[in-house]
Amino acid sequence: MFTRRDFLQFSAVAASITGFSGAITPVAAQQKLTQDQLLDFDSKGSLTLLHITDIHAQLKPVYFRPPSENYGVGAFEGIPPHLVGKDFLKHFNIEPGRALAYAHTMDDYVNLARTYGRLGGLDRTATLVKAIRAERGEGNVVLLDGGDTWQGSYTALKTNGQDMVDCMALLQPDAMVGHWEFTLGTDRVLEIIDSMSYPFLASNIVDTDWEEPVFDSTAFFDRGNTRVAVIGQAMPYTPIANPRWMFPEWSFGLRLGLLQENVNAARENGAEVVVLLSHNGFDVDQKLATDIEGLDVIFTGHTHDAVPEAININNTLVLSSGSHGKFLGRIDLEVKNGKITDYSSSLIPVFSDVIEPDAEMTRAIDDV
């Protein structure tokens, strides 16, 4: 017989293991979220930049607890993204126990997870992207994929990334960069790129024979009555972090001199807004924002950091959009006479229980 004492003992053990007390906190229990609230945004100008990164082949929603430690070195100690828990909430003026606190920190994670559920799911992201394109006009939006997209799940392993390639094609990004993509090997990477309808950019990869560019460095878009240049920066330390034998003909690196040349060339070719689509990592790109002239926006990836809004460094906006499909980054720009006069930014948490899945993407996910 299961007695009251048995139940209390079981509850105590469960709480010690999971950290869940058995009851949702009063503040959390009263909260309601809607898709319209997630999409609510202080729009500026006529140009919208969207960013996803480090999906790691996660097509479906996930529970993904933010870290309880994040160490910065030297000048980066104690500043974003190296803040966690209450320090993070205080810095970004986020109320504890609320939706954004759950999305960004580990505080009271178990209780809030039971309230807000999973985040992510590419069919939910597709819904958000389509809604923003409809609101702003497709000719005013640029969607960028920051890489680490084709690798990280069982189905991606078994299909050599084809499941992600097929699903991302439905999302219709305008450009992407890479990192773990290269572990598919040179032949497979080039095969996929040849099949894509959007460019794979990497200004910092050259061949080992003549140091000639392997991929396009820059793509231009006329969106929101603005000439936009997007320059790609693949993960510079790929041959150190990943098996070099899988791409022996390619040389990686930061190549800041070449990057500055590409920024200058973009300006000379009429770019009013220059965006770096980077897989350098947050701290590298914070430093890069002080060293490279002429960059307006850096969308950074690789380190999986998520900041609720873009950080302005020397008039360069730096935004990191998390990982595993948890967030969609957005920056709106007002551009007048070739210069940015105003902006707004946000990281939209993809709460899977709140967002209506996009039917087309759901079917594709089920198929793969």
Image (cartoon, rainbow, N blue to C red):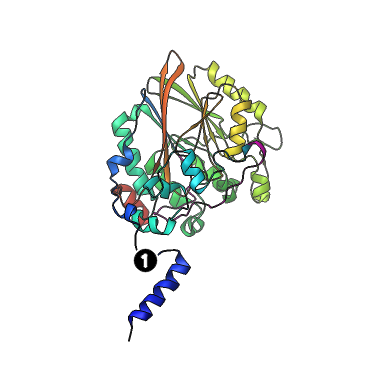
* Dominant secondary structure (helix, strand or loop) of the stretch shown in magenta: loop
Q: Could you tell me residue 231's position as x and y percent? A: 54, 29
Image: 82 above or below 137 = below
Q: Which quarter shows the C terminus?
A: bottom left
Residue 363 located left or right of residue 312: left
SS category of the residue bearing label 1: loop
Residue 263 falls within the magenta-colored stretch: no
The magenta span reads: 52-75
Taking the view exactly as shown, the residue that stands out farthest to the bottom is 1
Image: 6 above or below 41 = below
Residue 59 falls within the magenta-colored stretch: yes
Q: Could you tell me residue 253's position as x and y percent? A: 67, 37
Image: 258 above or below 168 = above
User: Foreground residue, 289 or 360?
Assistant: 289
Q: Could you tell me residue 312's position as x and y percent? A: 51, 28
Residue at left offset 38%, top offset 80%: 6
User: Foreground residue, 96 or 133?
Assistant: 96
- Which amino acid type corresponds to the residue marked 1 in the rendered image? Gly
Residue 38 located left or right of residue 282: left
For mark 1, does the 10 Å Cα neighbourhood hold few (<14), some (14 to 19), or many (20 or more) residues?
few
Taking the view exactly as shown, the residue that stands out farthest to the right is 209
Residue 166 visible (yes or no): no
In which image quadrant can residue 281 be found? top right
Q: Could you tell me residue 40's position as x and y percent? A: 31, 36
Residue 292 visible (yes or no): yes
In which image quadrant can residue 20 be found? bottom left
Q: Which quarter shows the N terminus?
A: bottom left
Q: Which residue is mark 1?
A: 22
